[in-house]
Amino acid sequence: MQLEYQQEEAVIRRRYRLVLVGMFLALAAAGLFSFAIGYYPLTPQEVFQAFLSRFGAAGEIKPQAVTIFWSIRLPRILSALFIGASLSVAGATYQGMFRNPLVSPDILGVSSGASLGAAFAILCGSPNWLIQLSAFTGGIAAVAFSYLISRKSAHSQILSLVLTGSMVMALCNAGVTMIKYVSDPNDVLQQITFWLMGSLTKTSMNSFSWSAVPMAVGLAIVLLLRWRINLLTLEEEEAITLGINVRRLRLILILASTLLSAAAVCLGGMIGWVGLMIPHMARALVGVDYSRLIPASAMLGALYLLLMDDLARSILSMELPLGVVTSIMGAPFFVYLIIKRKERD
């Protein structure tokens, strides 16, 4: 019996390594392919030469190719990779904490809070960096508000978090609606609407660098604690008997997931469904063990959002909002999940 278990575990580990290698190769190929998407396509040779030009390498390359590589394509591709990985990891973490596969990263109001912060900053005529900062602050404040209120509830912490998160989302959405109502329809309203649809059009290396720090911190925390998420999928009493401080672990993971979600939203706007869809796809590939699921979700989410961004800027002559494309892909998948759970029950 023990030998059979060891053999089965060896097969699972081997398959997991193959899946990660396959994802990495697909990610590298998709990243190189993404440089060729756009009004000014770059060949692989131009990409290589443009990259080396920053380090003093001499070569015959057009100046506009260098500008497009460093100022437009590279920050956009890096942003898609980091946002996709962050939303997917946050979604997988929340699904494990709440023991519900239909949970998404905005369950505690982070996206709604970030939208309210960004809308207020746009209304005040703030520059782009201040809009990002306001969105990030709004997302963090919304989750902090949800968590603090849930601690005063007499119900279980999970139920309290879900209820307070729904309340905070409703309040923040009402605030966004009010800001849109009083905004100038010829200028400010259009900016708010465009931001809420989600896009990477205005991404730059400065905006990416600012958001990459909290995303990297959040990813590092979740990756270090990923095996402990398995314990949160148990009943709370069982986890406590195993020596786990459930409340502290849940708080740390909520903080890390909030950093991921808030930074992703402040960089790319409202990009929905990624945190809901990708963890399910990753489970189908590597199983339900979170020590394997979190890395797989990060890589698969990065690949998925990069491909969706390529689709958004190539399917029509005009660029589609990225949030619209992910919603079109995500809504049917959500219906499939509901039907699948109904058949299982």
Image (cartoon, rainbow, N blue to C red):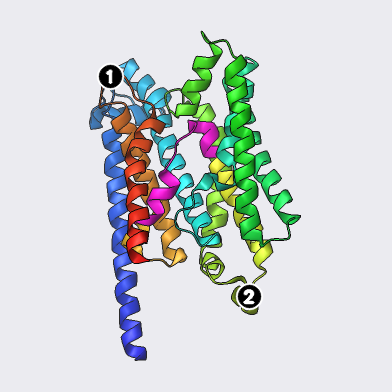
Residue 254, image x and y in percent?
61, 53
Q: Residue at x 42, y 61 (%)?
A: 293
Residue 213 x/y as whole percent: 57, 41
Task: Between residue 230 and residue 107, name the one nearer to us.
Answer: 107
**Which of the two labelled residues, at mark 1 and mark 2, occupies the earlier sequence position?**
1
Residue bearing the label numbered 2:
237
Q: Residue at x 54, y 44 (%)?
A: 106
Locate the C terminus by quadrant: bottom left
Give the residue at x 32% y 62%: 343
Based on the picture, tell me whether residue 88 belongs to the magenta stretch. Answer: no
Q: Amino acid at mark 1?
A: Tyr
Name the element at disc 1: loop
Q: In the drawing, does residue 252 fall left or right of residue 53?
A: right
Residue toward you, 124 or 176: 176
Which residue position holds label 1?
39
Q: Is residue 237 above or below residue 91?
A: below
Distance from disc 1 to disc 2, alpha carbons, whole Å, reads 57 Å
Three-letter amino acid code of the residue under disc 2: Glu
Q: Residues at badges 1 and 2 in contact (C-beta under 8 Å)? A: no
Does residue 217 appear in the picture of this structure?
Answer: no
Residue 200 is labelled as: none
Q: Which residues are magenta?
A: 262-281
Is 313 rendered above or below residue 181? below
Q: Is residue 268 magenta?
A: yes
Q: Quadrant of residue 170?
A: top right
Report the mark closest to the observer, 1 or 2: 2
Q: What main secondary structure does the magenta stretch of the protein show?
A: helix
